[in-house]
């Protein structure tokens, strides 16, 4: 089934039936009609077609199958002479999708589908529908699993199917599919095939059903094969699953039920005619046995509207999907095409609204949806005098990819050129999170490429018969890493500052902390980091989360040595925090406040604030956990400092700082932060930490080493007098330190 390809064909104004009564049929006035023709050269008895209905087929009564509810009320099928013919609505939804089967009249080859009833003029509720009389073809229907049901016997499964909610149906050629062909959603479902076997040659048949989980096959009301229970598909014809039966020539009723309790599915019905002692060469029950050739699938014809002289026409096709590491939500690529070819609308300039906040003015744009869902897609054509538009709800989800095609699927790099152009101010928070996860995935793959990628690159660059040259170490492409990190930070800053619809505490908080950290710690763009944190504050309804973002903005201001800005931000944050309960977000506020007070010389206030931070953050952590965390973080930070890997150092230090703020009092964390700033060549920031630590805890066992690091930082910055001051402070105030002699040597 190609459920993700649609084409809505609109006729030119001269071909539209101008008279309102042209849409009157069966006692009602319909809003739209479409024509469908029997293909030349074939003689089917059933036509199947599908289209998008612009939201006009919309009756949905609770407890009633919407397909039955709408048949004859918002949908009717007639001949050109307006004679009502038998039809079935096979599927409504997801979105505005509709599939219809029409039983053909031998005397005509053209039919009209009417749909959409104005609310001010309902059709005759007692319209007589023509009865469906043909039993040609094999009909597959799927239903959703909404309650527990048995899979161990045929009657249980049949009853479970009858009680389930319909998803959709279609005519198929035989019993074989590997997913739910009526929807892209990955979920448990039930299937039923109904039709007839037209046996041309009487004889003995071995019959087998093989499926993922349960399946049962009925012939003439009797179970002819079964694969009971919740087990996988059988790859061979196991004797206990093969049923042998005699079938006379002629028609035999056929039913096949299948169920899966997960999102995996596969099923097939096979047989072998006149087998020997056991089944040896099973084959799929062929389509001609079901008279599948008597069903024709055709494209729907032109759309005619009762209230418009023209409208655009478009089609779309889901191309592929790309998963993001550690993320169940996938990116989905879709190709749209403007198919408007007639009428005054055809000359218009296109504008596409993809339903996710993003737009395009290309004629045939490609678009990447950041998450699955139902989207209202609009195509507007503006020819200067008039604007014509059409809106349809479409389902976007990852397509069903066969195993043989998986190696041909695109990678994240295929999608990135499109994603880079997205206007973050138009995205909802969940979509924005997906966008930055895509950019972060590129960063991660650049810094730490998978082993197979490294091997492939080495092999590709090595001429045959020569030894491979040393490959660049992972992370040696800083331009790519910096580019996508900046895209993350600037996208979030833009969304928080410019998108009034960017709402929701959980996603906004996550966006601010993620992007703010990237701007602050990787890009060293403190101004951008501050803008991100401060833009999040008014959007957060949780006062503690807003206070945390304010505190982090103040922390950035301290990095910038702007104590005035830091005080203003902390004062505002203090007004927001709640006074009840323990909360790590409040712990962040108190930790930053402690560092600010130490920076401004208030040692007593700093120690009290730090105690509050510890109370909020570490209350649930056992002493052994604290020691383990401190040891792990410090060892990792030391290792990465020695290797001159500041990006790795800051990850460990921030985690340590966040989860164990008490370590600030001890001073070792502060010492490692100072060394980190020297590696980053941020010398004033490194030196300031020594003064801060002396105010907070002058008895820290690491004060002497911090003073040496501060002197080194000032020396590298060219501030020799300041460097001497730190060395003299070490000699004077800590005369028992083993580093005093080193300080004296440096003074010489």
Image: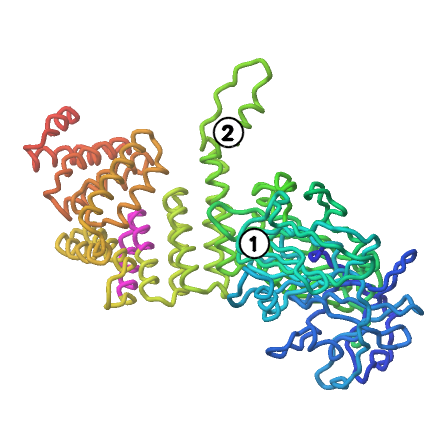
> In the image, what residue occupies the spot 87% across and 80% down?
19
Residue that badge 1 annotates = 213
Residue 13 appears at what percent x and percent y? 86, 69
Instruction: Give the magenta part as a residue range.
Output: 552-574
Q: Is residue 289 left or right of residue 594?
A: right
- Location of residue 605 by image quarter: bottom left
Instruction: Find the residue positioned furthest to the left.
Output: 736
Nearest the viewer among 680 and 726 is 680
Q: Secondary structure at mark 1?
A: loop
Q: Is residue 655 left or right of residue 473?
A: left
Can residue 70 be seen at all in this image of the molecule?
Answer: yes
Nearest the viewer among 159 and 241 is 241
- Magenta region includes residue 561: yes
> In the image, what residue occupies the spot 80% across and 72% down?
132
Residue 649 appears at what percent x and percent y? 32, 38
Q: Is residue 188 left or right of residue 722?
A: right
Can residue 304 be seen at all in this image of the molecule?
Answer: no
- Location of residue 615 by image quarter: bottom left
Instruction: Give the number of the mark in front: 2 or 1.
Output: 1
Relative to 287, residue 348 above or below: below
Q: Which mark, residue 454?
A: 2
> In the image, what residue occupies the spot 76% across and 70% down?
88
Overall secondary structure of the magenta stretch? helix
Q: Secondary structure at mark 2?
A: helix
Instruction: Find the residue positioned furthest to the front.
Output: 277
């Amino acid at each position: 089934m190609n459920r993700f390809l649609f084409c809505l064909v609109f006729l030119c104004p001269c071909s539209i039936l101008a008279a309102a009564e042209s849409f009157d049929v069966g006692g009602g006035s319909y809003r739209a009609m479409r024509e469908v023709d029997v293909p030349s050269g074939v003689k089917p008895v059933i036509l199947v077609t599908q289209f998008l209905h612009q939201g006009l087929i919309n009756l949905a009564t609770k407890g009633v199958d919407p397909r039955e509810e709408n048949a004859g009320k918002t949908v009717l099928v007639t001949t050109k002479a307006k004679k009502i013919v038998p039809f079935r609505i096979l599927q409504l939804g997801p979105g505005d999708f509709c599939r219809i089967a029409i039983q053909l009249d031998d005397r005509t080859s053209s039919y009209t589908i009417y749909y959409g009833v104005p609310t001010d003029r309902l059709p005759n509720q007692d319209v007589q529908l023509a009865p469906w009389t043909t039993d040609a073809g094999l009909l597959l229907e799927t239903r959703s699993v909404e309650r527990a049901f048995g899979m161990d016997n045929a009657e249980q499964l049949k009853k479970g199917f009858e009680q389930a909610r319909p998803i959709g149906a279609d005519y198929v050629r035989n019993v074989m599919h590997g997913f739910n062909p009526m929807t892209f959603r990955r979920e448990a479902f039930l299937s039923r095939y109904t039709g007839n076997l037209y046996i041309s040659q009487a004889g003995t048949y071995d019959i087998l059903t093989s499926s993922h989980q349960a399946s049962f096959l009925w012939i003439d009301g009797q179970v002819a094969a079964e694969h009971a229970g919740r087990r996988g598909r059988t790859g061979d014809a196991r004797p206990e699953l093969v049923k042998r039966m005699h079938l006379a020539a002629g028609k035999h009723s056929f039913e096949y039920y299948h169920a899966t309790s997960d999102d995996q599915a596969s099923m097939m019905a096979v047989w072998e005619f006149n087998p020997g002692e056991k089944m040896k060469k099973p084959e799929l029950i062929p389509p001609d046995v079901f008279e599948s050739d008597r069903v024709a699938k055709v494209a729907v014809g032109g759309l005619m509207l009762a209230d418009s002289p023209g409208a655009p026409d478009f089609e779309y096709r889901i191309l592929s999907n790309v998963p993001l590491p550690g993320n169940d939500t996938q990116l989905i690529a879709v190709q749209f095409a403007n198919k408007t070819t007639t009428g005054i609308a055809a000359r218009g300039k296109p504008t596409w609204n993809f339903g996710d906040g993003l737009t395009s003015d290309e004629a045939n744009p490609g678009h990447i949806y950041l998450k699955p869902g139902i989207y209202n897609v609009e195509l507007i054509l503006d020819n200067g005098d008039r604007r014509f538009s059409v809106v349809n709800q479409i389902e976007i989800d990852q397509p069903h990819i066969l195993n043989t095609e998986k190696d041909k699927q695109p990678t994240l790099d295929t999608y990135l050129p499109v994603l880079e152009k997205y206007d973050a101010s138009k995205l909802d928070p969940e979509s924005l999170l997906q966008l930055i996860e895509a950019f972060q995935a590129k960063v991660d793959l650049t810094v730490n490429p998978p082993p197979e990628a490294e091997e492939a690159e080495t092999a590709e660059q090595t001429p045959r018969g020569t030894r491979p040259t040393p490959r660049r170490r992972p992370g040696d492409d800083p331009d790519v890493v910096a580019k996508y990190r900046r895209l993350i930070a600037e996208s979030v800053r833009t969304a928080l500052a410019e998108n009034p619809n960017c709402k929701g505490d959980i996603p906004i908080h996550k966006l601010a902390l993620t992007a703010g950290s990237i701007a602050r710690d990787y890009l060293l763009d403190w101004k951008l980091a501050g803008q991100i944190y401060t833009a999040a504050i008014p959007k957060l309804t949780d006062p503690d989360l807003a206070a945390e973002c304010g505190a982090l903005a103040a922390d950035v201001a301290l990095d910038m040595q702007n104590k005035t800005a830091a005080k203003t931000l902390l004062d505002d944050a203090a007004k927001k925090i709640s006074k009840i309960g323990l909360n790590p977000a409040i712990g962040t506020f108190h930790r930053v406040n402690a560092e600010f007070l130490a920076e401004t010389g208030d040692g007593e206030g700093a120690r009290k604030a730090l105690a509050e931070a510890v109370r909020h953050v570490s209350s649930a952590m056992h002493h052994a956990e604290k020691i383990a965390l401190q040891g792990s973080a410090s060892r990792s930070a030391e290792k990465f400092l020695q290797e001159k890997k500041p990006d790795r150092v800051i990850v460990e230090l921030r985690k340590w700082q966040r989860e164990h703020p008490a370590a600030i009092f001890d001073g070792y964390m502060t010492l490692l932060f100072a060394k980190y700033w020297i590696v980053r060549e941020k010398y004033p920031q490194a030196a300031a930490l020594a003064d801060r630590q002396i105010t907070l805890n002058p008895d820290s066992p690491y004060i002497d080493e911090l003073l040496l690091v501060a002197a080194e930082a000032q020396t590298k910055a060219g501030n020799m007098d300041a460097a001497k001051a730190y060395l003299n402070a070490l000699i004077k105030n800590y005369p028992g330190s083993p580093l005093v002699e080193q300080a004296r040597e440096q003074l010489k």
